[in-house]
Amino acid sequence: MKRIKFNPGQATIAPLWNTNYMLIGLVGLLSIVGLITLFSASVHLELPFFKKVVGRQLLWMLVGASLAISLQFFQKKIIYDSVYILYAAGLFFLILPYFIGPSTAGTARWLILGPLHFQPSEFMKIIVILAISKHLSRRDLSISEFQSLLPAIALALIPMAIILKQPDLGTSMIYFGILFPLFFWAGVRLFHIFLILAPFISIVTAFNFYTFFIWVLIIVVVLYFSKINLVTALIIGLLNLSLGLATPVLWNRLEPYQQNRILTLFNVGADPQGAGYQVIQSQIAIGSGGLFGKGLGKGTQTHLKFLPEQHNDFIFSVIGEEYGFIGVGIILALFLLLIILLISIAFRQRDRFNSLVILGVASALFFHIAINVAMTIGLMPVTGLPLPLLSYGGSFVLTCYGMIGIVLSINSERSQTKVELRK
């Protein structure tokens, strides 16, 4: 199959000046839905408005909107030149919770500045997207050579390893996931993408003998048709085989709660009062919503507190119970439009760095949406990933608005350039 050559700046889906308004409209609409859902989840609590999650979320959204607006005043060159400095600072703040952050249930994810609690791992997502995009946009980079991809892989894996140790499996998955859309967008050979992804697939498939056997056969077929030399093919094959055989060791290094969450994926009823409780209650909530839902503030799973983390990781379950299938369909359609719009904006950029950054934002948001929804319906282990623009959380809200602000800034800069050229 012949790959489509990346040719930015040629799409004509919508005028440039229109796309920013469309993006603001979609983000605003999803944010309003999030506030309404959080209001419903906390409607029966006898607390002042700004002490409820909906009030605090509104404040965070206002701060996030201010951040997005302030990013309009930063020129792309300033961001581009300071990316690696930001990356080093981001790693420093990622490590800092191990020394001065609060330790809760064996975790070290948070920093406290007075009344503010924030997760450095959330803000690091933006920095990693910028850093990988800068590397892949270098003019002297030979994108067809595998060794040229190693710095980009390291830029993602270093913070991923730190966050995995905190431990935060869900967030670490995002860092690894955004690599592949960025590689594909930059024109990396599909065979090289396969080589990077293969070790992780080898580890996952090794939990079952038959899936691992099939995967080994796939590796052999791919290596045969790639026509690489025999020594390299043997090294790649043996590496993947060794990782598969080492899976029991890697499994034992996981935290007990992480093991339970993975086991629950295959048999949610094995521990209905423990690891499977969240997923079971989430499935009940979504299924009980029916076609039109129970109505705002009338979800029994939500308001009788059967559903844990309803304002955060499981906000989608509240939507399913109270808005029903129709409401869920509308929310997913809005998310789909958001991702398509971001990809169309990325495709239109003439500058490779700009295009990669916007595609990275689209990828990060997509993985958050896909993993969160799959988690709530039992198709993936519970990883603690929030739903963009809907879930409660100050650090994540600021990260989402920061990403959107960068996209608006890049798109506005290009729009202004076109106007000046026409003059």
Image: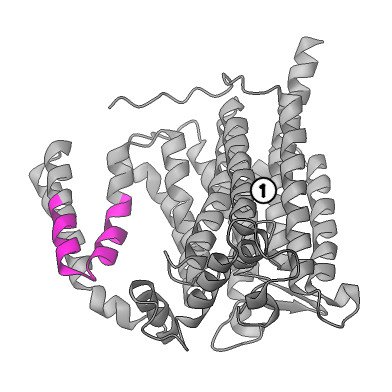
Residue 89 visible in the shown view: no
Question: Horizontal placement of 195 versus 57: left or right?
Answer: left
Colour style of the rendered protein structure? one colour
Residue on which the image places disc 1? 82
Magenta stretch, main secondary structure, is helix
- Residue 197 in the magenta stretch? The answer is yes
Residue 389, given in percent of the width and then of the height, sits at 69, 56
Residue 202 visible in the shown view: yes
Determine the residue positioned at 63% across, 77% down: 301
The foreground one among 60 and 73 is 60
Within 10 Å of the Cα at label 1, are there few (<14), some (14-19), or many (20+) other Cα atoms?
Answer: few
Farthest right residue?
48
Determine the residue positioned at 30% across, 76% down: 250
Farthest left residue?
230
Determine the residue positioned at 67% across, 59% down: 323
Please tell me whether mark 1 sits on a helix, a strand or a loop: loop
When the figure is inspected, residue 55 is found, relative to residue 195, above or below; the finding is below
Determine the residue positioned at 63% across, 42% down: 338
Q: How many marks?
A: 1
When the figure is inspected, residue 385 is found, relative to residue 231, above or below; the finding is below
Farthest top residue?
423
Residue 166, given in percent of the width and then of the height, sits at 52, 77
Give the position of the C terminus as an image quadrant. top right
Residue 384, given in percent of the width and then of the height, sits at 55, 71
The foreground one among 204 and 409 is 204
Give the position of the N terminus as an image quadrant. top left
Residue 45, given in percent of the width and then of the height, sits at 82, 81
Q: Which residues are magenta?
A: 196-217
- Residue 13 in the magenta stretch? The answer is no
When the figure is inspected, residue 27 is found, relative to residue 205, above or below; the finding is above
